[in-house]
Image: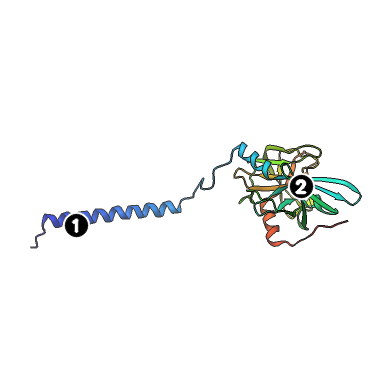
Amino acid sequence: MKWVSGRGLNRKRIVRALWVQTSVVLLFVAGAAAWPRHGVGPPPITDVQARTLLVTATERVVGFGCGVVQTSGTGVAMADGTLLTNRHVVDGLLGINVVPDLGPTMGGTSRVSQAVALAVVRPSPAVRSRIRLARDDPRPGQTVWVGGFPANAGLRVTRTRVVDYVDGRARAQAGPVVRIAAHLEHGMSGSPVLDATGGLAGIAFAIEETSGYGLVIPASMIRDVLAHAPLVPARSC
């Protein structure tokens, strides 16, 4: 018979206990990694933060020439120095001026999409903001903020909600568009719509006649157009 000292027994028990604890910890970590994660993204912005973002990034876009005194629309300055607006805000004009709520007026060159009502303006000098495209499209019922310049009025920022999605092909858009429960006015074409993360959830482009709801090109469609669809210079008169 082989005798084992009490010290040897204690060492074996300690090693066995540590092995069991390590195994439990590893199992717990592996299980936690497989669980779905909720709330990992940035916290939602406040109403004040959303309004501040829109005040600093929303610009009036004024077109001139071609037998008209001027036209008026809205655009949003992006983090990369470009300005996004609607195609019809810049197309078929002699030129445009970008008129911020605060700061000097500037010119710019425009390129437009043939697939959706989107235009990309490069102001000179470039104006950068903190706004980037939202990672996800907004869901029905979600709170969003829209900022725009009604004709002959100052900047208007409205907190509203997403109603639903409708087929955009009836309005010559490449896919579904968002309806928001905000009543837009002439001059607010190209208005930015921010989601609860402060990302650009879409660009307003039309008013639905039957309901008065605003129609918005969603972020996913904007991203696809910027990545894959050719942009051509805006038409001049």
Horizontal side of residue 71 vs 215, given as left or right = right
Residue at the spot x=53%, y=47% of the render?
Answer: 41
Horizontal side of residue 60 vs 27, given as left or right = right
Residue farthest along the right direction in this orientation: 67
Horizontal side of residue 191 vs 140, given as left or right = right
Q: Position of residue 143 (x, y in %)?
A: 63, 39
Residue at the spot x=54%, y=43% of the render?
Answer: 43
Residue 12's label in the rendered image is 1
Helix, strand or loop at mark 1: helix
122, 84: nearer the viewer: 122
Determine contact: label 1, label 2, CB under 8 Å: no
Q: How many marks?
A: 2
Q: Amino acid at mark 1?
A: Lys
102, 198: nearer the viewer: 102
Residue 105's label in the rendered image is 2
Residue 76 visible from this viewpoint: yes
Helix, strand or loop at mark 2: loop
149, 176: nearer the viewer: 149
